[in-house]
Image (tube, rainbow, N blue to C red):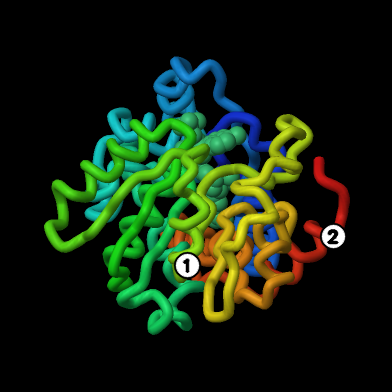
Amino acid sequence: MVRAKKVLGLLGYQIGYSLSPVLHNTAFAHLELPYFYTLFEVYPPDLLRTALDGAKALGIVGFNVTTPYKERIVPYLDLLSAEASEVQAVNTILNQDGQWIGYNTDIVGFAEPLLPYQSHLDGSQVVVFGAGGAARAVVQALRQFFKPKHICLVARDESKAALLKEHFERRSKHLSLSTCALDAESLESVLASARVIINATPIGTESTALPQLKTMRLFPAEWKVWSAGKIAYDLVYRPLLTPFLHDAQTHGVTVISGLEMLLAQGAKSFEIWTGQTFPKDIVRTALLQQLSSVCP
Ligand code: NAP
């Protein structure tokens, strides 16, 4: 007799690069849990609600949610955790007795690898590239776990960064935020005065669906941005050392790969779905092995 497995997956678009299936399936196999995790490409975006209704009918246990649906999915959920409600973005959902509960494990997942550098962050200038769902989680994490003096949000469409700024200004009088366009002349000096620079865009990702991203740069390599004591944190994890992190490392700067966040947020999602402790070290080894092989 075939023993049915409980199904989980990643909802998104152009997500062939994702390591989430390896991450979760390695953990399920290690703990001998009857779950299976796969990729669900949803397109066009109008089909998102239909996809969720179908998944509920099929008894799918839950999902991770990624680009471009982290914010778009919110109105279709039955309940939100306090953190997901605060940022109005969700990266994990659980089917609890036919109700979709939304969580945001990106917030703590982003914060965890930065916690050892708390003293670098407190009272410092921080630059965040991006104004999407992940950037929302990043700003919330900076606000919740650290005390930055100022955060500058950099986006190709500055009006989207301005919306994010307003969202957080409505919630916190003490948070100092500004915006900057990706092509602004002032960006070099903004980056030069920042202690921590974070990439929350897909720029630098190795992906066969979007090959142009791999060679794109957040800013020109010749800019004088790096100096001792800075931190570069890239949410992109494929490749492990993106062009952004490579440049930073060449200048002796501390770098944090998106792999650390992937593991930390994945561990929290895993615990929400299964109630079990995530075997982080086993999974890290499997992910590093996968990253040394060819991109799908
Ligand atoms: P999203 O909601 O689609 O937002 C992406 C952001 O990047 C938007 O501000 C978008 O600008 C900008 N962007 C996209 N392509 C760009 C380009 N070619 N040039 C300049 N800006 C560009 O995606 P997300 O969920 O925030 O995710 C962002 C990245 O973080 C993804 O690569 C994702 O894989 C990664 N991530 C990693 C982890 C992890 O665990 N390591 C967790 C979460 C996210 P527009 O709005 O103008 O399109």
Precedes in sequence: disc 2 or disc 1: 1
**Seen from this angle, which residue lies furthest right?**
294
In this orientation, which residue lies closer to the viewer: 190 or 66?
A: 190
User: Percent x, y for residue 206?
Assistant: 75, 44
Mark 1 neighbour class, 10 Å CA radius: few under 14, some 14 to 19, many 20 or more: many
The label number, if any, that marks residue 196 in the structure image: 1
Q: Is residue 45 left or right of residue 290?
A: left
- Element type where label 1 sits in the image: strand
In this orientation, which residue lies closer to the viewer: 161 or 111?
A: 161
User: Percent x, y for residue 203?
Assistant: 63, 43
* Residue at 47 percent of width and 17 percent of height: 47
Vertical comparison of 250 with 83: above or below: below
Q: Is residue 160 left or right of residue 64?
A: left
The label number, if any, that marks residue 292 in the structure image: 2
Can the viewer see residue 235?
A: yes
* Residue at 54 percent of width and 53 percent of height: 199
Vertical comparison of 287 with 166: above or below: below
In this orientation, which residue lies closer to the viewer: 184 or 113?
A: 184
- Element type where label 2 sits in the image: loop
Vertical comparison of 208 with 44: above or below: below
Mark 1 residue type? Val
User: Percent x, y for residue 108?
Assistant: 40, 65
Mark 2 residue type? Ser
Quadrant assignment for the C terminus: top right
